[in-house]
Amino acid sequence: MLKIESMKARRGMWKSPEINLTLREGEVAAIIGPSGSGKTSILLSIIGLLPYEGTIEYNGVEVSLIDKKYLRSKIAYVPDEPESYILNNKVFDEAAFGPENLGWKPKKVIESTIRALEITGLLNLYNREVSTLSGGQKQRLAIADALSISPEILLLDNPFSNIDWEARKSISKTLKELCDNGLSIILTGYSLEELYLKPDKTIFIGEVGKPYVRKTSYDNLLVSEKFVYVKDVWFSYDGRNNVLKGISLTIGRKEIISVIGKNGVGKTTLLKILAGIYKPSRGTVLINGRKPNPHLSLYVSQNPSAFLTGTTPRDELPKSENTDATSLLEKFGLSYLLDKPIHTLSLGEKRIISIMSGLYRGALLLCLDEPTAGLDYKMGQKLGEILRSAASNNEAFVIATHDISFAEAYSDRILLLDGGIIYEDWRRIFQ
């Protein structure tokens, strides 16, 4: 079905590691590698969006010679930054966009779209505005976009990074059933453990590091002063359905809090309230005794492309007498990125730049939305160490995440948001 020999994806002078793969009907292949190793570029070459060296054949024909519209009706791609690819306002319209573009008859479009939304657990949200979806729901919608055209091969780029644990298991189970019926899949990731699909073939293109380990207790860093005060906060987008229902919590200086929960429960909403982007329907939010403002608290989006405004990391990172972009990136071993165009960076590299940009803008509370999505273990460990170092300097952090292992390794407390309510005893409820 798909035969790849001595293939290297190309972006200007850069080339990816060489790939050799024969993918047969119903097989799952995994490409495992660190952030920036070329996984996304390899997938983009397979669907004809990037040039390449070597050979990529689909059913015996070189993909560079195949009509692009026909090729993309057979090979579907799910990006690791779904917000950059979503085009329609309504969930159903977005999932139906692919088959409509292929000229399918209306009945077939509707049937295929309903099936794709069922698989991804979004059918009950078919009439929702895409802009109101959580990041994880948008990632599931991107998978529905791809499945709606009934492809023969599905390319999944780090597909589960923003999706909650229950949805990962459900979607993976259904994808396995589709593979049993002939669908072939190539997916990328940073470790085999995170894939949720057992691959028939695995290609490793670099060292991703070891899982997170909590090295020490951070209790000695905390002080008694309560820096963030949230009391009985409610929030609704439409004036009828409450996303948050009487949230109360406090955060001390030097404290790192992680908030976990399913997609769509309001984690991002809570972070945006703490950053002053949204105002609660009722309740009190105080940062250091004052209402949230950009000088006190800052929100860093899970979509780094929406946060970055510079053309290169050197342009993006704050400049001051006490801040040197080169030394900041050297902490991650990424100083070589300083003058690369931001649009050419991997998702993980963009995320690091966006977090570092936010970290050095002077806010005392930083609200990080899915900060490890797109990061391999090595980069995630370095991020955790920098957050702990920053916390020791009186800064506080609230992290919304599905990465429980990162939260356990680097947080002082983990809170569960479920049904609009915050729970401290997250382990008992989660289990």
Image (tube, rainbow, N blue to C red):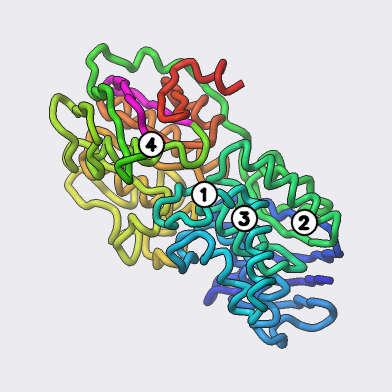
Asked if 50 appears above or below 31 in the picture, the reply is below
Give left or right: position of 138 versus 158.
Answer: left
Q: Residue furthest left?
A: 290
Disc with the residue nearer the chain's start (2 vs 1):
2
Q: Are marks 1 and 3 in contact (CB under 8 Å)?
A: no
Residue drawn 67% across and 69% down?
A: 149
Residue assigned mark 4:
243
Q: Are marks 4 and 1 in contact (CB under 8 Å)?
A: no
192 or 116, which lies in front?
A: 116
Q: CA distance from mark 4 to mark 1?
A: 15 Å
Q: Is residue 363 magenta?
A: no
Q: Is residue 311 visible?
A: yes
110 or 188, which lies in front?
A: 110
Residue assigned mark 2:
29
What's under tag 2, amino acid-wise?
Ala
The label number, if any, that marks residue 137 in the structure image: 1
Asked if 304 appears above or below 387 in the picture, the reply is below
What's under tag 3, amino acid-wise?
Leu
Q: CA distance from mark 1 to mark 3?
A: 11 Å
- In percent of width and height, residue 16 lies at 63, 66
- In percent of width and height, residue 259 lies at 43, 30
Image quarter where the N terminus lies is: bottom right
Q: Which residues are magenta?
A: 244-260
Q: CA distance from mark 3 to mark 2?
A: 24 Å
Circle 2 or circle 4, nearest the eye: 4
Disc with the residue nearer the chain's start (4 vs 3):
3
Q: Are marks 4 and 3 in contact (CB under 8 Å)?
A: no
Q: Dot 1: within a 10 Å radius of its alpha carbon, few (fewer than 14), some, or many (20 or more) residues?
A: many
Residue drawn 56% across and 61% down?
A: 79
Residue assigned mark 3:
117
